[in-house]
Amino acid sequence: MWVVLALALLLAGVGGCGSAVPTPTPTPTKTPKPLETLTSTATWTPLPPTSTPLPTPTPIGANLGTPTPEPAFTPPAEPPAFPPDVCPLTGLRVEDPQVLERPPLAVKISNAPAIVRPQSGLSLADVVVEHYAEAKLTRLTAIYLSHDAEKVGPVRSGRQIDLEIPAMFQAIFACSGFAPGNIPLFQKSDFADRLIVRDPPWVHQEPFYVIPEQGKPQWHSLYTDTPGLWKWAAKRGVTGRREIVGWAFSEAAPAGGEPAESITIVYAPGIADAEYRYDAARGVYVRSILGEPHVEALTGEPLTAANVVVLQANHVETDILEDQYDGGHYSIQIQLWGQGPGLVFRDGRAYPITWSRPERPNLVRFLDAEGRIFPLKPGNTWVQLVPLGHPVEYGKGG
């Protein structure tokens, strides 16, 4: 009896967490389909590369008005070139330009269940992307370039969206592992030489370590650090600056938009959401989850963002099983290519944009109604990926 129970617990930890003991891929019993519980009737079609002017972006939410004409400045038609000491992901100067002479790092970090919070290292990431994983939970991919983090995690397994994020950031990708059905996709990816994965078939153990914590399962206790990851990559010849273009930054806020001192994006009621409140004194959004401050474990301080970017993209449930818990959950393909509607929140205001990524190596761009690059505020950015038509609540106060 105890042997059976132990085996059951082991399998519960394996499912969807990139354990060293992969679960055999079962024969799919369903046809892949759009996620009916996550998408609305909105339509979107990926577009091939084209020179045709982009259409006017579709607003998210019913309370978004038409931007005021005569903007405070003219956004650039093309992404600007940055000086060698300015980070292309934040628009900020760095004290040591040598830190930009290395590839970005993308690290997969758990966001559920609540026991994994507070996480370590999120405050030092230049960009954090939050997305649906499965079972209506969310997971994070943190992008590091201008800062080092002495502790990052808990590190978890990658998802199909991580076929896109490292490609467009030209990043090294570190995670604990993948569901068996996703392994071949990453082995054949165009950044396969930039993968740092703990579990088989890679078994890259060196940059990862377990930090036991009372009451926390081992699969929620895996950590890494950016110096160790960059050192590991350098030993294998993955070095050198990447020419990352696509974003623009401006201290001056564009005219127009609507008041957005509070933002709420509900992924699953009572289970997963992203909440932001604008702190005008500091000029940043302060992040919470389910009404509780989302804090950085290294400092105990709430996480903040200079920019919050919401991107709507088509979400499709695949036939690849991520786990076998509660009947099993299937991998989600988030189609972050072509173009789609979105919102940029900065300086306490919301601006409608069109996001565009016509080719795989392209960093996703944010475009205004005239097809010009929409400027972010210098600083870090949280990107919230949501299905088409997904509601976003924002307004004054809150």
Image (cartoon, rainbow, N blue to C red):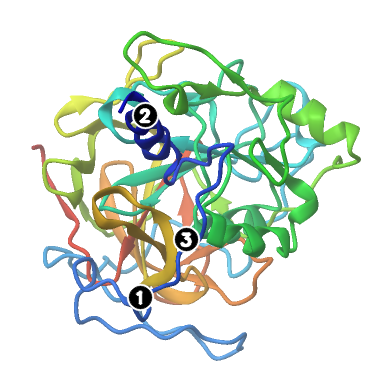
The mark nearer the N terminus, 2 or 3, is 2
The image shows residue 206 at horizontal and vertical percentages of: 74, 24
User: Where 324 falls versus 86 (above or below)?
Assistant: below
Near mark 1 (Cα within 10 A), the count class, few <14, some 14-19 or many ≥20, is few
Name the residue: 40% across, 19% down.
Answer: 296
Q: Is residue 217 visible?
A: yes
The mark nearer the N terminus, 2 or 1, is 1
* Quadrant holding the N terminus: top left
**What amino acid type is highlighted by mark number 2?**
Thr
SS assignment at label 1: loop
Near mark 2 (Cα within 10 A), the count class, few <14, some 14-19 or many ≥20, is many
Of residues 10 and 255, the one drawn nearer to the viewer in this rendering: 10
Q: Which residue is mark 2?
A: 304
Name the residue: 59% across, 77% down.
Answer: 358
User: Where 258 falls versus 78 (above or below)?
Assistant: above
Label 3 vs label 1: CA separation? Answer: 44 Å
The image shows residue 331 at horizontal and vertical percentages of: 42, 61
Q: Is residue 127 left or right of residue 230?
A: left
The mark nearer the N terminus, 3 or 1, is 1
Q: Which residue is mark 1?
A: 29
Mark whose residue sits in front, 2 or 3: 2
SS assignment at label 3: loop
SS assignment at label 2: strand
The image shows residue 378 at horizontal and vertical percentages of: 51, 39
Mark whose residue sits in front, 2 or 1: 1
Of residues 168 and 194, the one drawn nearer to the viewer in this rendering: 194
Of residues 361 and 355, the one drawn nearer to the viewer in this rendering: 361
Q: Which residue is mark 3?
A: 374
**What amino acid type is highlighted by mark number 1?**
Thr
Label 2 vs label 1: CA separation? Answer: 43 Å
Name the quadrant containing residue 66: bottom left
